[in-house]
Structure formats: structure tokens, C-alpha cells
Image (cartoon, rainbow, N blue to C red):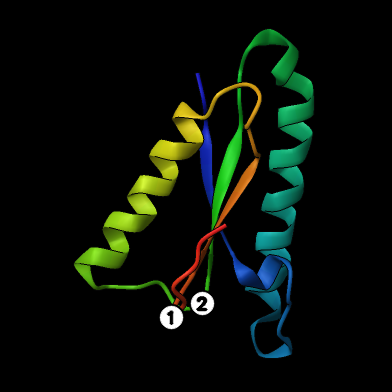
Amino acid sequence: MAPSFSGCGLAQKPAKEQTSLSVGKAALRALVDCVADETEHDGIRVGMVTIDGTMPTHELELKRIAELYWQLFTMSERSRKRELLFRVNASSFD
């Protein structure tokens, strides 16, 4: 089992123009960490994909985001991360 969530860059870089969204995404990020800490010993993995920028609409970018969710789900125990990052308008992904 691997519940996954969607975050945005505002969780890490809040913007005064989007205070509510910034706070909400930071809270979601904290929730993912807390739930993951509670459930990992039971074999339940929790993670999130963070989209840093405006949500893309181009099919290729959407496919890459979907691939990140799949990667999060299929990651081995040794290489597991709780958060994967998709940078909009960038050629690299973390």
C-alpha cells in the first residue's frame, strides 16, 4: 500500500500573494511526514509528488508527472524517498 499526495513549491517557498495555498501545502507536506513515520514500520509507504510551478497542461509534462507517481510507488526499500519533485519549465527532475 502506498498513499500518495500532490504538493506544490509553495510548501517550500511560500508566497504572500498565495498565503492560504502556501500554508495548506506546507501542512500537507508535514502530514505526509507524520503519517509516513507512523506507518512505515507496518509496510505502508506514504509519499508525495511536488509540482514546483504552475500545473502543466501539456501531455508530455503530464506523462512525466504520472511517471513520478509510479516511480514513488515502485521505489525499492533502499532508494525510497518520501517526496519527488517536478520542476515546471526545467529539464531536470529530483
Residue at point 78% right, 35% down? 34
Secondary structure of the residue carrying numbered label 2 = loop
Residue at point 45% right, 27% down? 74
Residue at point 73% right, 77% down? 14
* Count of marks placed on residues: 2
Lower sequence index among marks 2 and 1: 2
Say which residue label 2 marks.
Answer: 53
Q: Which mark is residue 89?
A: 1
Secondary structure of the residue carrying numbered label 1 = loop
Q: Is residue 68 left or right of residue 27?
A: left
The amino acid at mark 2 is Gly
Q: Residue furthest bottom?
A: 17
Q: Measured from the top left, where is residue 46 in percent x and y?
A: 61, 31
Q: Is residue 58 left or right of residue 82?
A: left
The amino acid at mark 1 is Asn
Q: Is residue 52 left or right of residue 61?
A: right
Q: Measured from the top left, where is residue 63 in percent x and y?
A: 27, 56
Residue at point 71% right, 84% down? 15
How packed mark 1 is, by other alpha carbons closer than 10 Å (few <14, some 14-19, many 20 or more), is few
Q: Measured from the top left, where is residue 67 in percent x and y?
A: 35, 46
Image: 93 above or below 15: above
Q: Is residue 35 left or right of residue 89?
A: right
Image: 12 above or below 43: below
Residue 44 occupies quadrant: top right
Q: Are marks 2 and 1 in contact (CB under 8 Å)?
A: yes
